[in-house]
Amino acid sequence: MGTADDLRRWVEAGLIDEDTAARISEHESRKGGERVGRGTEAVAYLGAVLVLVALAILAAEFWDRIEPWGRFTLGAIVTGVLIGAGWLLGRSAEPAVNRAQAFAWFLAVGAVALTAGVFFDGIVETDGQESFLWTSLVTLVVTIALWLARSSTLAIVAMAFATWAATIAIISRLDTVPDWAFGLAFAGLGIAWLLLTWGGILRPATASYAISAIGILFVAFPEGSHMPWPILGLVGALALMGLSVRLNQTVLLGFGVAGLFVYIPMMIFELFEESLGVPVALLITGLALLGVVVGTVRFRKEVET
Amino acid sequence: MTRQAWTAVGGAVAVMVAVVVIIVLAAVPLPDFPPVAPGQFDASLAYVTESNCIRVADLADAEVRELHCVSDRDWIDNVVWTESGIEVGVEGFQSTITVLDPDTGDVIETRNRDGAYPGDWLNQEQNLWVDVPSDGTVVIRDETNQVLVTLEGPELYGVDAVVGASDGQMVALVDSSERLAVFDRNVGQPYLVDTDARPYPPPSWQP
């Protein structure tokens, strides 16, 4: 039985978490001597990005002149190449090459979205909103499949973007719902995502908790400073800070503090700007944020212990 | 799966169900537009759909006919029903004005725009106003500021195009849900014509 099997058993037994398992795996794989250095890897990614940008610019020049089926075929070929390349890269024992799989599949998700968009918009000719809905749903299914095949950070980020896009598409179809439905749906998704991460279903844990926090903190964004939404945002930020101690996750503390920095000034200005004036509102905001900084230092110690 | 995983799945499902229930309960219905009935109105109008087509609504028969569609790479930016046909301004790879037969949809003529607009597009004066006094409330007024119709809908509801007929009596509107409706100024109740209309370019009444 190899190290990977041992790690899998230990994660399933709850002895170590996914992040620790990934670090051990990376450490063990380096014992034999990593053949590709970090610098070389970074240069390779830079080169790949430049090539992709150049290809995208070239394609954009004649994109409008290609018939929809041509665009679809082109998109499908690029998708197939990227998924196939990722599949081959993932079979390598070299960690750097293995990481390139996650990158290739992340790009493949973009290609899938483009191809599906061309299919629904140009070939099936559904209207704009419907095309967006079906495109996001197809992309979501693909991101889930790729994440199941390899649960990398990039895979779960792609899955989160696809989930958010599908949520926006579904709510946009409902003409009858208020604006705050977007914030509520994102926050609900954030809580559900957090629960699934805590339950060990979504991984890697750190990236997944970060995605949860973004969803929860989004609760008030569609309504801005209109009460009571900043209060809900503040409650979300405080809850994230509390959970950071409970779940021993610094990333939740970071997002919680960021949330306080957004929602405390928003609330104070909404409540006191007219009655007390801008200078007093600024003073209260400044004192509150200083309190947040002091509180964060204490919280961080608790999380780390 | 462990017990913790099952608890997490149960919790996640419960949260999402709660969110859906809250959103459904908070939904406010769109203003009710009963479908237009044959013989209710005696007029016709041309309009553009979200699928980039020109349609004609014969209100006397309560019928909608699709006359002509353009490629999704082109953009219809003007529609004017004139004595010589339905003139359609199209921007895209080429910039043209196409004149359509209102009965058959046949292309009578296609000419380069050369900066021109179809029919008397630039000289159209509507004198109809859309007010939004509060979120979800839309009021359409005439040139004397008299309220023609008040519509109550969800928070983001709006009316994006209002066009009066030359007889001064009929008004067509396109709302934010892509619904084309018509109403008589004296009655004020809009009647639904189509659910796939684009507000820009606005509909054009038969002269």
Image (cartoon, coloured by chain):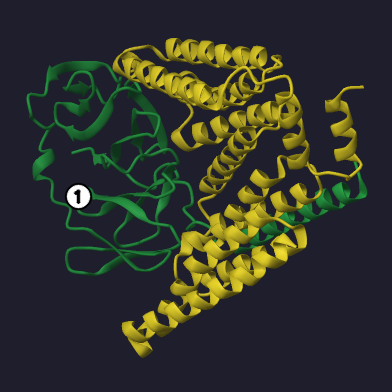
Chain colours: A yellow, B green
Please tell me which residue lies in front, A197 or A41: A41
Give the image location of residue A210, x and y in percent. 62, 50
| Residue located 38% across and 16% down the image | A55
Please tell me which residue lies in front, A129 or B50: A129
Look at the image and tell me in which quarter the C terminus of chain A lies. Answer: bottom right
Give amino acid for label 1.
Answer: Asp
Q: On the rendered structure, is A284 left or right of A143?
A: left
The image quarter containing residue A80 is: top right
In the rendered image, is residue B27 in sight?
Answer: no
In the rendered image, is residue B190 in sight?
Answer: yes
The image quarter containing residue B14 is: bottom right
Q: Residue furthest bottom?
A: A275
Please tell me which residue lies in front, A38 or A1: A38
Using the image, determine if residue A49 lies above or below residue B14.
Answer: above
Give the image location of residue B123, x and y in percent. 8, 44
Q: On the rendered structure, is A260 left or right of B37?
A: right
The image quarter containing residue A9 is: top right
Q: On the rendered structure, is B13 left or right of A118?
A: right
Give the image location of residue B159, x and y in percent. 35, 54
| Residue located 42% across and 39% down the image | B62
Using the image, determine if residue B17 lies above or below residue B54.
Answer: below
Q: Chain of mark 1?
A: B
Using the image, determine if residue A203 lies above or below residue A247.
Answer: above
Q: Mark 1: which secondary structure?
A: loop
Residue that numbered label 1 is attached to? B167
